[in-house]
Amino acid sequence: MNYENYVLSNFKAISTNESLARMIVSSFVSSTDIGLNDLLDIKTAVSEAVTNAIIHGYDEKNGEVSMLCALNDGILHIEITDYGKGISNIEKARTPLFTSKPELERSGMGFTVMEMLMDSLEVISEEGKGTKIILTKKISSNDED
Amino acid sequence: MNLKTYKKENNLIVVIKGEIDHHTAESVREKIDDDYFKYRCKNIVFDFKKVSLMDSSGIGMVIGRYKKVKFSGGKVIVAEANETVKKIFEMSGLNKIIDFYKDLETAICVLGGTN
Ligand SMILES: Nc1ncnc2c1ncn2[C@@H]1O[C@H](COP(=O)(O)OP(=O)(O)O)[C@@H](O)[C@H]1O
Ligand SMILES: [Mg+2]
């Protein structure tokens, strides 16, 4: 892969690995002089995408999540992929407060949170094949906001 | 994530330390629901002072508690949330149904009148 740096990790789709994924991305960007607020935003967005893979992609059953973290020209690029059920209507899924699992006390705010915290969010999905979430954020040093 | 609850007047105070995600929100929910009935409380006050990260699972967890307590005329209050956590709550419009206070004492005081 043609990135200045990257790390690719594959892990089992279980909820204990949500914090693992946050730690991986956090360690990965620690080579930059990223500010604490930006770091927290990135960890939160990763948490959303990985949680979605586990509870929606695989319905909390057996599966594997793949996460690519890459850096190029000061831009952090994250791809989170599952090979689960896919999303039939992406536009609807991205609507604030829409959730297909209200019984699990989901808020339907995951995509909105990712969108607000990152610079860009792209959703690629095919029913029965899986979903890939692509997140990017410019790494600016030591924010103070 | 570390979780403690205690009763103060008719409020269940819930002190959460660490990260609230889908994994940890489930245990938070179970413990609160048990203790709320066990201690015969009316309101729930969250002490978020030591919450370092919260994703949208936390929104779902707080809304879920709000729906439970409103049947008994209770309230849910969030105290001491940091700016990042508040930002997550604001995105969902949750700040329209749940009150936020800077400190725990004020939150409990405000509830004092709701017996
Ligand atoms: N990886 C995924 N695979 C299948 N469906 C998904 C995936 N991610 C999200 N979705 C769908 O999009 C909806 C909205 O997602 P989100 O905004 O994170 O809210 P929530 O997780 O609270 O339901 C989910 O309820 C689900 O139907
Ligand atoms: Mg979600």
Image: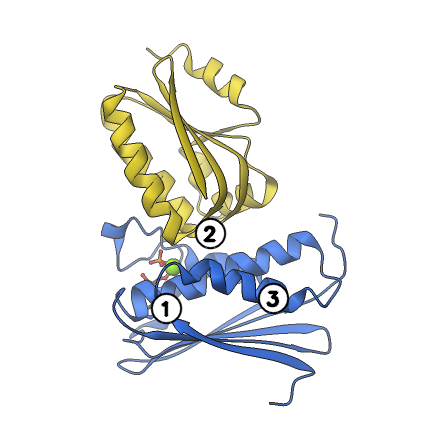
Contact between marks 1 and 2 (CB within 8 A): the answer is no
Judge depth for marks 3 and 1 and give the one in front. Answer: 1
Which one is in front, A70 or A108? A70
Above or below A21: residue B96: above
* Residue A32 in the figure: left or right of residue A102: right
Q: Residue at x 42, y 63 (%)?
A: A17
Query: Which labelled disc corresponds to residue B55?
Result: 2
Q: Colour of chain A?
A: blue
Mark 3 CB within 8 Å of ligand 1 = no
Q: Tell me the element at label 3.
A: loop
Quadrant, the C terminus of chain B:
top left
Height in image: A68 above or below A98? below
Among the 4 quarters of the image, the one containing residue A42: bottom right
For disc 1, the chain is A
Q: Which chain is yellow?
A: B
Q: Image point 71% across, 56% down: which residue?
A: A35
Image position of A141 (left or right of B27): right
The residue depicted at 30 percent of the width and 76 percent of the height is A84
For residue A119, the mark is: 3
Q: Depth check: give the residue in front, A80 or A92.
A: A80
Judged by depth in the image, the label closer to the viewer, 2 or 3, is 2
Tell me which amino acid carries mark 2. Asp
Q: Amino acid at mark 3?
A: Asp
Q: Which residue is mark 1?
A: A53
Q: Nearer the viewer, residue A80 or B113?
A: A80
